[in-house]
């Protein structure tokens, strides 16, 4: 009996799932947080995390101040350029500002707030640009072939080549006005061959994962509970607007610049480096 081509594709994807088409990222406590005592393991499907949260206190806090994301020494020396590091750190800050805006009022750096949020990038796994380019070319070829021979409902996305995948690890916490830790997260995730879109840039996967981290840590504070122990919810109107490059809900978030929006979505589809399309923060955020 001849096996249909589509079934072979499904079998191939299953092999990727079970044989590990995913970059390995270390889950380590690097000492950048004020405390690790209350952290508990709370992994997601693709994410490894350890979290702690004082739910009652966090839910009673109305304001947040976002400190600039920093790099540990190891992450700083991972091989990114200065421009890529600035873009990656800003992507984390922007994602945090967007996610936290769902419930909190975000205040400027020079004003007090109930919570002080800061994140430290502790690991950056570089994307192999050549392999990413090959994956994108192969994926386009498969898409063209499928569009010619298969109905839309039975087309299966082409997986990436499971080599040269990037990754990201971040440690973050939210502290009170008195400096007491109210929430913390040690977060690590690698790009995978099934859901991660290849970009021809060494920072491509880390850049995308920065948004995932921002979403996860924001949900920890907005809901006061692990974002990995429940069915994923639909994105808020605020998140959708930000994804399309629209104005942020909180004015302070303009200091991180707006996301690439539709241009970014097009860039993702053809594998453009994020440094080509992410304009970053405005040159003069306080200007007219």
Image (tube, helix red, strand yellow):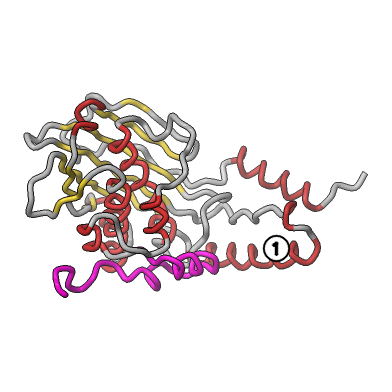
Return the x and y of residue 268 as percentages of the image width and height: 50, 64
Which quadrant holds the C terminus?
A: bottom left
Q: Is residue 204 above or below residue 53?
A: below
**Whole-percent x and y of residue 209?**
40, 51
Percent from the top left, x then y, of residue 15?
66, 42
Q: Would residue 36 be found to the left or right of residue 17 on screen? A: left
Binning the other alpha carbons within 10 Å of mark 1 as few (below 14), some (14 to 19) or many (20 upward) gives some
The quarter of the displayed image where residue 256 is located? bottom left
Label 1, secondary structure: give it: helix
Classify residue 175 by image quadrant.
top left
Residue at (52% x, 58% y) in the render: 197
Does residue 209 belong to the magenta stretch? Answer: no
- Report the side of 20 relative to 242 (left or right): right
Residue lying at 41% horizontally and 50% vertically, measured from the top left: 167
Quadrant assignment for the N terminus = top right
Say whether residue 232 is left or right of residue 107.
right
Horizontal side of residue 5 vs 251, given as left or right: right
Indicate whether 27 appears above or below 129: above
Q: Position of residue 18 (x, y in %)?
A: 62, 37
Q: Residue at x 28, y 37 (%)?
A: 221
In the picture as drawn, the residue positioned furthest to the right comes out as 1
Q: Is residue 262 magenta?
A: yes
Question: What is the span of residues highlighted in magenta in the rendered image?
Answer: 259-288
Q: Which residue is mark 1?
A: 142
Q: Quadrant of residue 42?
A: top left
Q: How many marks?
A: 1
């Amino acid at each position: 009996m001849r096996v249909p081509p589509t079934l072979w594709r499904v079998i191939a994807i299953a092999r990727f799932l079970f044989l590990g088409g995913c970059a390995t990222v270390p889950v380590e406590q690097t000492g950048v947080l004020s405390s690790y005592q209350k952290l508990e393991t709370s992994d997601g499907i693709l994410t490894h995390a350890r979290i702690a949260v004082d739910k009652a206190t966090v839910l009673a806090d109305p304001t947040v101040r976002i400190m600039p994301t920093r790099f540990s020494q190891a992450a700083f020396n991972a091989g990114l350029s200065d421009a890529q590091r600035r873009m990656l750190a800003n992507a984390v800050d922007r994602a945090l500002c967007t996610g936290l805006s769902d419930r909190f009022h975000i205040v400027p750096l020079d004003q007090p707030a109930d919570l002080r949020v800061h994140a430290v990038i502790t690991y950056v796994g570089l994307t192999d640009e050549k392999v990413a380019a090959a994956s994108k070319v192969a994926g386009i070829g498969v898409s063209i072939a499928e569009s010619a021979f298969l109905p839309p409902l039975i087309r299966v996305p082409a997986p990436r080549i499971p080599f040269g995948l990037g990754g990201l690890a971040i440690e973050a916490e939210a502290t009170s006005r008195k400096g007491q830790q109210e929430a913390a997260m040690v977060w690590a995730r690698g790009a995978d061959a099934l859901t991660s879109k290849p970009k021809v840039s060494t920072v491509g996967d880390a850049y995308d994962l920065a948004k995932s981290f921002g979403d996860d840590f924001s949900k920890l504070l907005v809901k006061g509970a692990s974002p990995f122990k429940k069915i994923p919810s639909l994105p808020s109107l605020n998140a959708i607007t930000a994804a399309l490059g629209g104005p942020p809900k909180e004015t302070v978030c303009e200091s991180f610049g707006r996301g690439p929006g539709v241009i970014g979505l097009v860039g993702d589809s053809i594998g453009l480096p994020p440094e080509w399309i992410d304009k970053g923060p405005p040159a003069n955020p306080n200007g007219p």
